Image: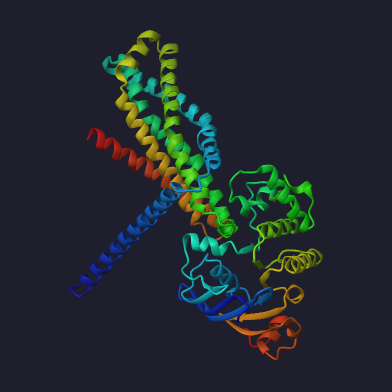
């Protein structure tokens, strides 16, 4: 616990009377890459949004570096959010602005300042994700899905966050592009020494990018262990999910 | 019958009460949203470049449609007044009625409606798309307040732009009336302009500008509010866009009546 970066304790959240998170608890160590797997609607995205303060949990505690974040607002919430970078499932790039402004948005907070320096910063970060300066002035809609993911990745790492969240990083990509993104995530997490939390349905991705994997089912973590044990958990729910079988305890 | 009647009455009261409470809750939500935009927009960080961009979007790029609307309306108004006035030999009232009609009512209302159609819908569609594609969540994670960055520049730009556009529309509308009266109806140009000058007062312009600022506020507020609350993909964005335009129209027409009634009532 001494090196815990993120501690979720008894986290609960319900929408219209339906419990999405039910006293969920999970710890992510500093420098660790953890993947949360689970069915659609199992509360994976809600977990990330609760940690980021985009959704307020109904009950429970969220500690970031030992600091309680539930109920944080204003400058305190801003300070906590400064520790995070996030790669959204659909990239969530701002389509009204060119790529270089997207990448440097966290550094400028949308102000049009230091244009030349910001272009340089954008170029460096794009280079890290395998894109060159030719995309700087393009709009997100002019890029393929895989390139948009890379730009979103560059945007997430540009402010050098301590923690990066990856929300379904390989969804919508072909297996080769998905593997490229996985490799990028692994190298970025290793190079930058960040703590990473990924939510995914993609078992190949989970095994490649995570040190540990946790399975969320009916609002609770039902199994958490090293990635090498993912296909040998002894948990019938996890076995059914990772093997993608229709028959089993998960209906 | 005695036992059934109170039940039906209770049901009716329940439905009315639910409707009233729902409406009040909606008004409260919109008021809270407007309050957040204003209070956050008045505190740093400010976004002057975004404000200027919105002035261009809302004001400058709306000028062609506003100008065309104003010139046709001014000319049509002059023709209508001339035709109606000729029934009791009051054709000479054309310049006075045109200028009062345009400045006090038609200028602000038509500009408000045209801009609402063009701008409220665009705002709701843009912000709604940002909501359903998680761009608003991305803004928050990038430590940028959507109220300051997206809403406040739009709201303040609309409040500033609309009065300026109404001034332009009034001038063009009066010009439209003058053009038709002089070219088609045989009015003397100098006399027409003299009567126009005599019948228009600074108070009329003040009321037009106040109305325009109020309309600008409602146009941007409805666009931002319904866009921000959009849910459910493309259908949700379409719904938000339609609701934004309809509610902006209603608020413009309602507030126009209230302001007119307060000033002349």
Q: Residue furthest front?
A: A2
Task: Locate residue A239: give its quadrant.
Answer: bottom right
State the residue in front, B125 or A136.
A136
Q: Quadrant of the C terminus of chain B?
A: top left
In the image, what residue occupies the spot 48% across and 75% down?
Answer: A14
Residue nearer the viewer, B247 or A114: A114
**Residue most toward the bottom?**
A234
Callout count: 0
Q: Is residue A37 above or below residue B73?
A: below
Position of residue B161 in the picture relative to residue A8 (left or right): left
Residue A95 x/y as whole percent: 64, 49
- Where on the picture, by quarter, is residue A3? bottom right
Q: Can you say which quadrant of the picture contains the N terminus of chain B?
A: bottom left
Asked if residue B188 can be seen in this view, the reply is no
Visual colour scheme: rainbow
From the viewer's side, name the closer residue of A229 and B9: A229
Looking at the image, which is closer to me, A90 or A30? A30
State left or right for residue A73 relative to residue A164. Answer: left
Name which residue lies at 69% across and 49% down: A99
Q: Is residue B248 visible?
A: yes
Residue B89 spot, x, y in % from top left? 27, 14
Position of B80 relative to B217 (above/below):
above
Q: Residue A146, located in which quarter of the rendered image?
A: bottom right
Q: Considering only vertical position in the picture, is A159 above or below B105?
A: below
Q: Position of residue B157 (x, y in %)?
A: 47, 39
Residue A127 sits above or below residue B3 on the image: above
Q: Measured from the top left, where is residue A228 in percent x and y?
A: 76, 83
């Amino acid at each position: 616990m001494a090196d815990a970066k993120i501690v979720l304790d008894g986290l609960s959240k319900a929408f219209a009377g339906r419990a999405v998170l039910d006293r969920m608890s999970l710890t992510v160590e500093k420098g660790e890459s953890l993947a949360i797997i689970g069915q659609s609607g199992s509360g994976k995205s809600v977990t990330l949004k609760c940690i980021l303060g985009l959704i307020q949990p109904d009950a429970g505690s969220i500690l970031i570096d030992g600091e309680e974040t539930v109920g944080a607002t204003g400058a305190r919430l801003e300070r906590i959010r400064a520790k995070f970078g996030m790669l959204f499932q659909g990239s969530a790039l701002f389509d009204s602005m060119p790529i270089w402004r997207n990448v440097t948005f966290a550094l400028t907070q949308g102000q049009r300042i230091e244009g030349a320096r910001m272009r340089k910063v954008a170029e460096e970060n794009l280079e890290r994700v395998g894109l060159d300066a030719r995309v700087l002035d393009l709009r997100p809609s002019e890029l393929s899905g895989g390139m948009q993911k890379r730009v979103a990745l560059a945007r997430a790492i540009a402010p050098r966050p301590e923690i990066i969240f990856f929300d379904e990083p390989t969804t919508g990509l072909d297996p080769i592009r998905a593997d490229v993104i996985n490799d990028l995530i692994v190298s970025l997490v290793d190079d930058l020494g960040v703590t990473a939390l990924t939510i995914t349905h993609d078992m190949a991705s989970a095994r490649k990018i995570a040190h540990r994997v946790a399975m969320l089912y009916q609002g609770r973590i039902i199994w958490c262990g090293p990635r090498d044990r993912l296909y040998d958990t002894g948990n019938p729910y996890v076995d059914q999910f990772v093997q993608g079988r229709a028959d089993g305890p998960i209906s | 019958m005695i036992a059934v009647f109170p039940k039906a009455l209770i049901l009716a009261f329940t439905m009315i009460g639910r409707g009233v409470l729902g409406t009040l809750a909606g008004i409260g939500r919109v008021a809270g949203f407007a309050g957040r935009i204003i209070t956050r927009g008045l505190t740093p960080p400010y976004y002057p470049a975004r404000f200027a961009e919105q002035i261009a979007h809302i004001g400058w790029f709306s000028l062609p449609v506003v100008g065309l609307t104003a010139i046709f309306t001014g000319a049509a108004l002059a023709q209508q007044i001339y035709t109606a006035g000729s029934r009791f030999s009051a054709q000479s009232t054309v310049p006075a009625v045109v200028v009062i009609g345009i400045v006090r009512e038609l200028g602000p209302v038509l500009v408000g409606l045209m801009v609402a159609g063009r701008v409220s819908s665009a705002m709701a569609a843009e912000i709604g798309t940002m909501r359903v594609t998680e761009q608003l969540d991305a803004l928050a994670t990038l430590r940028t307040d959507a109220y300051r960055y997206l809403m406040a520049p739009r709201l303040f730009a609309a409040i500033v732009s609309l009065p300026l556009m109404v001034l332009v529309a009034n001038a063009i509308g009066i010009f439209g009336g003058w053009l038709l009266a002089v070219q088609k109806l045989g009015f003397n140009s100098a006399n027409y302009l003299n009567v126009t000058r005599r019948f228009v007062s600074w108070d009329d312009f003040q009321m037009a500008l106040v109305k325009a600022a109020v309309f600008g506020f409602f146009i941007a507020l409805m666009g931002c509010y319904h866009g921000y609350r959009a849910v459910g993909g493309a259908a949700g964005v379409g719904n938000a866009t339609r609701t934004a335009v309809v509610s902006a129209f209603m608020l413009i027409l309602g507030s126009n009546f209230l302001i007119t009634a307060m000033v002349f009532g």
